[in-house]
Image (tube, rainbow, N blue to C red):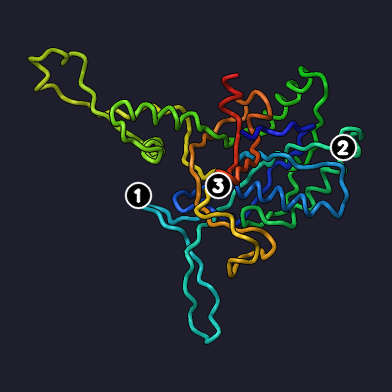
Amino acid sequence: MTTLPNSDGLLILPRLRVQNANAISSPLTHGFPSMTAFLGLMWALARKLEAHDLPLAFDSVGVICHDFDEQVTEGGYVKAFRLTRNPVDKDGGSAAIVEEGRMHMEITLIFGISGGFVELDEHAHDAIAQTVARELAGMRIAGGSVLPSHDWRSRPALLRFGDDAEDVRRRFRHLRRRWLPGFALVCRDDLLHARLDQLREAAPETTALDALLDLSRFNWHPVRPESASDDSSASTAKVEWKPESRPGWIVPIPVGFGALSELLPAGEVQSARDRDTPFRFVESLYSIGQWISPHRLDNAEQLLWYASTDPAAGLYRCRNDFACLQSA
């Protein structure tokens, strides 16, 4: 299995205000952009920076959400997206309303980086961070526009990992305090596997999708009082409904794509976006994520997401090693 690349440092772009980002992360989920959007941003940013010839390469990305405002109707149990009417069509008539989910958010992006920047001084590190921030300001984050900010907390920074492990831990503890209040998104495949095993004890035919849906909702179970344990009062005892305890703020998330077809030669599929790259049809892959406060992170590796590809198995997914690093 692909493992997290060994990064030489972190590039931190704090307190980015993003307007009208895509809130629909997959055909089944909404509320925050998919991690595939942030990995795509990382690769697009790397291509933008090629003109500057900076001595660094992007390995991974993490995201911390400080604030969000999904553009939905207020009031009532059922909510709907606030939609915009498009300009008139070529005949002067009203164009169709295209349903889209939008949200405003304030996030911090953390990139795991490697390269020759480790040999430069702090002034060069500041210049690199400012260059990256300027390029990002003109890009889209999950389809949303980056708004200008003059807040002192939004100053970008480049952190180089040294050979002193204790110094690295001390600097990371200082960083995670600056990321409060906020929540970091990590992957919890382990919770999904554990729930699947639990459900299969009672129903062996349970699928991974059943386990995902079970974890994605609030479950209430009937509980009889302890005083009604004897048979005489069991039939008349009042049953209480109690919510199931949850292991944290867990949510269903898309984590990549699975192949639906064989890999087709470049240019064979009509209307493909890129005529020079092999093509295959895919569908979304889902898992369980958890929003966790940054002060509960022990190191940067728990936060970072990276790409993992297995063309033979048809898997193209985002991975995060929080679960295995937590148990290590």
Q: x%, y% of residue 264?
A: 59, 59
Amino acid tagged 1: Tyr
**What type is the residue that disc 3 sits on?**
Gly
Task: Name above or below for residue 43 compared with residue 181.
Answer: below
Amino acid of disc 2: Phe
Which is in the foreground here, disc 3 or disc 1?
3
In the image: residue 136, left or right of residue 126:
left
3 and 1 marks in contact (CB < 8 Å): no
CA–CA distance in space, label 3 to label 1: 39 Å
Q: Secondary structure at mark 1?
A: loop
Decide: few, some or many residues near mark 3? Use Cα within 10 Å; few <14, some 14-19, many ≥20: some
- Residue 182 seen in the current view: no
Would you name the residue on which mark 1 appears? 77
Measuring 48% from the left and 33% from the top, which residue is drawn there? 249
> Which residue lies under the disc numbered 3?
314
First along the sequence among labels 3 and 1: 1
Disc on the earlier residue, 2 or 3:
2
Q: Quadrant of the N terminus?
A: top right
- Camera-nearest residue between 311 and 12: 311
Q: Quadrant of the C terminus?
A: top right
Q: Is residue 83 above or below residue 132?
A: below
Say whether disc 2 or disc 1 marks the residue closer to the N-terminus.
1
Can you tell which quarter of the image residue 56 is in? top right
